[in-house]
Amino acid sequence: MKFQRYSVLLIIVFLIQYGHSAPIWPNWKYDRQLTGRCPYYGPDRDILLWSFSTPDTFSIRSASPVIGEDGTVYFSSPDSFIFAVRPNGTEKWRYKIGNCVPGGFPAIDQRGRLYFNTTDSRVVAIDDSGTYAKLAWQRDCSDSTVPIFSLTPVVVGSDRTVYVSLDSLYAIDSLGNRKWAYNTGLTNGFPPAISLDGSYLYYEYCSDPFTNNIAKRRTDGTLIWTHYIGGAPFSLTWASPCIGADSTIYFAANDAYLHAIMPNNTDKWAPVSLTGAFLYVTVSLGINDTIWLMNRQKRPVYWKFSPTNGSEVLKDSITYTPSRYNLYNSFITDVLGRAFIALIDSGTYNLTLYVFESNGTLNRTYTIPLEGRRTNRTFPAMAPGRFYLVGGNKLYAFQGGSIGVKETEMSDLPVSVKIFPNPFCTKAEIKITPTTTSFFVKIYDSAGRLVRDFSRLTTYDRRATEFIWDGTDNSGIPVKSGVYFCRVEGPKIIKTEKLVLIRER
């Protein structure tokens, strides 16, 4: 009897310490593939819930918040502070990172640990104790004595490896140890997109002073191939690629070409000629992997492209409130395929949020006066029922759309999803039948957070195909009892079925 009580106590302690759900918003482009596509509803009305003001003496020039599993919003300021703000807009804690500036594009892993890079070439890992910030570790990641002034985003792999570009591309394990570092040439800056199965990294790589490439590297550091993008420095974008549902690598080069590269180092289709230039701009994906992109002109042009052949679906320009040169910002897309982007207005300090319908028509704009504090580069972050944006020296919270994962079917192809048993205690069999296309199976919790991504593309040929979910998250940690959603995603397929997990007591 004592042994049983002790075993139960150990299980309870394990679940309390390690039983985390996936974060609501893990990095600046939501997922590890850097698509900018999330399972939440963006706001359909402009209702400002609150704004949180920092005491900064400097404007926050670059920012993207991340959101933990409990809804806490984290972001940094140029006054060396990292802020944690509760969903109701009150300060949870602030943490001074030292006499340096933390990067404005942090990441948060599945255990809730935050990662920031700094201007003194460190990567800093911070834990949220609930009432204060606790330094987990810090690692000097620079082989150069030159200070790093261009602070670019951080990305975390499914094994909690941290990837960051400072003077080189670094891989750091979850304990803060350097796994490897490789020089990326003139393209130092943006982190890699991580393949759907978590095994490969794709990033911009200038192999010599005259040649720009997309590189494929294993997560153990082994270089697999390089794919020629264009001559340096003209094609250098200083941006990340993104990865589609069929593992295509999409990249917009600064010399105005859109590239689609297959994992075997072949072109999916010939590079598409664009207009304007593209600096620090990462391609984003909407429903069925439609490609969203905006250039850097003073009246920016935005496009949608078909992922099938690269054909232009739409092309238009922003003329309502002309933007300053869009050097930095990319789209975020929601579960309905609507696209969101924030731009600084020309000749003002105003930040305007643009909302586009999935067909590319402009739905509305919302302007935030920044009171003389210009924020050039900011990415929105979404949560169930919330929408966050950093501008000037404030975090703004807007009312989001409907909570949860969309449960209606938006399919042009016949597909059924059957789950047995349901409810289940230990494992559920998910049977999908029939279809002639390819798709993914993902599990979300009732708040719309990604819990389990099976992360492999399988092509089906009118056969029933089965997946087994054992009630664990992407880290193999058991999730809590509750309602979950099994979502089938693929070209012309979006279908969701509810399932209930009941843990034995």
Image (cartoon, rainbow, N blue to C red):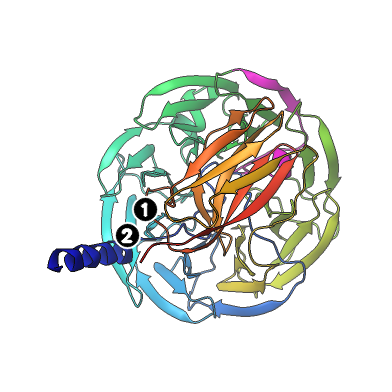
Chain-order first, disc 1 or disc 2? 2
Q: Quadrant of the C terminus?
A: bottom left
Q: What residue did someone put label 2 on? A: 18
The circle drawn on residue 210 is: none
* Residue under the point 77% across and 32% down: 274
Name the spot of residue 20 as percent of width and height, x first.
39, 60
Q: What residue did someone put label 1 on? A: 477
Name the spot of residue 486 as percent of width and height, x first.
59, 50
488 or 56: nearer the eye?
Answer: 488
The image quarter in which residue 314 lies: top right
SS at mark 2 in the image: helix
* Residue under the point 74% across and 28% down: 308
Other residues around mark 2 within 10 Å, as few (<14) / some (14–19) / many (≥20): some
Magenta residues, start to end: 266-290
* Residue under the point 36% across and 49% down: 147
Query: In this picture, is 44 found above or below 415?
Result: below
